[in-house]
Image: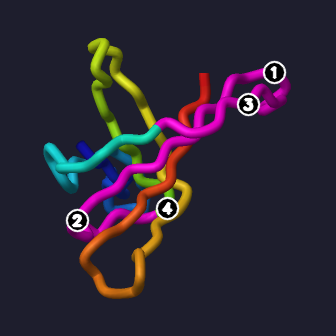
């Protein structure tokens, strides 16, 4: 599933909150874990796993969206989208690039 953080008006004074909103359910894809690195983020050492998802349709995914994917072992993965590539420029195959930070 793919989620996007969308603004949610709180009141007439312009106050805004944000909520994760489902934009695409059960995206058919091939999930391909890539490199695993350890790096310092936000003052602590984190493990960063890079992912690449091969898809046959463009669901309108944008950088900053979140993919919630359950792997073959039943582990829920929360992956932030960091890029999208239209393979061969034909609109028939795409890579979504993402990162999971533990």
Find numbered disc 1 in the image and state the secondary structure of the residue it sits on: strand
Which residue corresponds to mark 4? 63
Find numbered disc 4 in the image and state the secondary structure of the residue it sits on: loop
State the CA–CA distance, disc 4 to disc 2. 18 Å
Query: Residue sitting at 51 percent across and 48 percent down?
Result: 98
**Quarter of the image where the C terminus is located:** top right
According to the image, what is the colour scheme of the structure? rainbow
Question: Which of the two labelled residues, at mark 4 and mark 2, occupies the earlier sequence position?
Answer: 2
Which segment is the magenta one?
33-62
Which residue corresponds to mark 3? 37
Question: Which of the two labelled residues, at mark 2 and mark 3, occupies the earlier sequence position?
Answer: 3
Q: Are marks 3 and 1 in contact (CB under 8 Å)?
A: no
State the CA–CA distance, disc 4 to disc 3. 21 Å
Question: Which of the two labelled residues, at mark 3 and mark 1, occupies the earlier sequence position?
Answer: 3
Which residue corresponds to mark 1? 44
What is the x, y in percent for residue 4? 34, 53
Q: Residue furthest front?
A: 88
Name the disc covering residue 56, or none. Answer: 2
User: In screen coordinates, is 33 left or right of 49?
Assistant: left
**Quarter of the image where the N terminus is located:** top left
């Amino acid at each position: 599933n793919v989620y996007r953080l969308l603004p949610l008006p709180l009141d007439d004074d312009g106050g805004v909150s944000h909520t994760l909103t489902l934009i695409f359910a059960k995206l058919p894809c091939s999930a391909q874990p890539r490199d695993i690195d350890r790096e310092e983020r936000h003052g602590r050492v984190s493990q960063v796993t890079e992912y690449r998802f091969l898809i046959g349709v463009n669901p309108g995914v944008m950088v900053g969206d979140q993919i919630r994917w359950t792997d073959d072992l039943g582990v829920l993965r929360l992956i932030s989208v960091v890029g999208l590539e239209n393979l061969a420029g034909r609109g028939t195959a795409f890579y979504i690039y993402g990162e999971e930070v533990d």
